[in-house]
Amino acid sequence: MNSQLTIYNEQTEVQQQLSDSSSIQTALDKVGVIYERWSASTPLAADADQDAVLAAYASDIETLNQRFGFNTIDVVSMQADNPKKDEFRQMFLSEHTHADFEVRFFVDGQGLFYLRPQETAPGAVYALHCTAGDLVSVPAGMTHWFDMGDKPNFKAIRFFTTDEGWVADFTGDDIASRFPLLSC
């Protein structure tokens, strides 16, 4: 499946669906979310390690790093055989915010970000199905959740401006339970 943006209302009714990257980028830009498509400068093997991944995207990473000044850049991978996949999935499926903005680039596989831009689009939920080549930056303080699917398969570059890395402030709202899950 290709990248897709589905805009829902909070009652889970589909308001709009977009599948071309320029339309997705325009819609997300309106709510303060950065969305870009990147291509590797060199082909990557399926089992590429962190160094190979970072080298393949070095130019894009450097451009983004000059813009935001990241402290840490790493590669995370989750596969269906990970014994903690269910635990991680449940944690990420809980609506949360971050004090720092969250930046992810999908090198391989897929994931589904649900974004609630309450300040810029009250009552809307943006479901961004990310695939290989998608970069997404969720602004600090924007409520969201992430679904990696029941059989996760993704590799992503993570960018952090803080030394702490991924730190979530869970909202306690059960809205995520009302939306469709990613099935892989």
Image: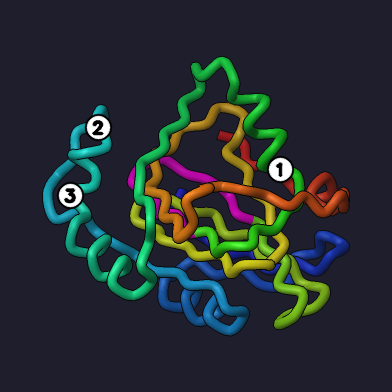
- On the image, which quarter does residue 94 sit in? top right
Can you identify the residue that label 1 sits on? 93
Disc with the residue nearer the chain's start (3 vs 1): 3
Q: Secondary structure at mark 3?
A: helix
Badge 3 amino acid: Ala
Badge 1 amino acid: Leu
Which x, y percent locates residue 3?
A: 47, 57
Q: Residue at x 53, y 59 (%)?
A: 102
Which x, y percent locates residue 101?
A: 55, 64
Disc with the residue nearer the chain's start (3 vs 2): 2
Tag 3: Cα neighbours inside 10 Å, few (<14), some, or many (≥20)? Answer: some
In the image, 164 versus 174, the foreground residue is: 164
- Residue 105 in magenta stretch: yes
Quadrant assignment for the C terminus: top right
Disc with the residue nearer the chain's start (2 vs 1): 2
Q: Which mark is residue 30?
A: none
Q: Which mark is residue 56?
A: 3
Q: Which mark is residue 49?
A: 2
Q: Residue at x 62, y 79 (%)?
A: 31
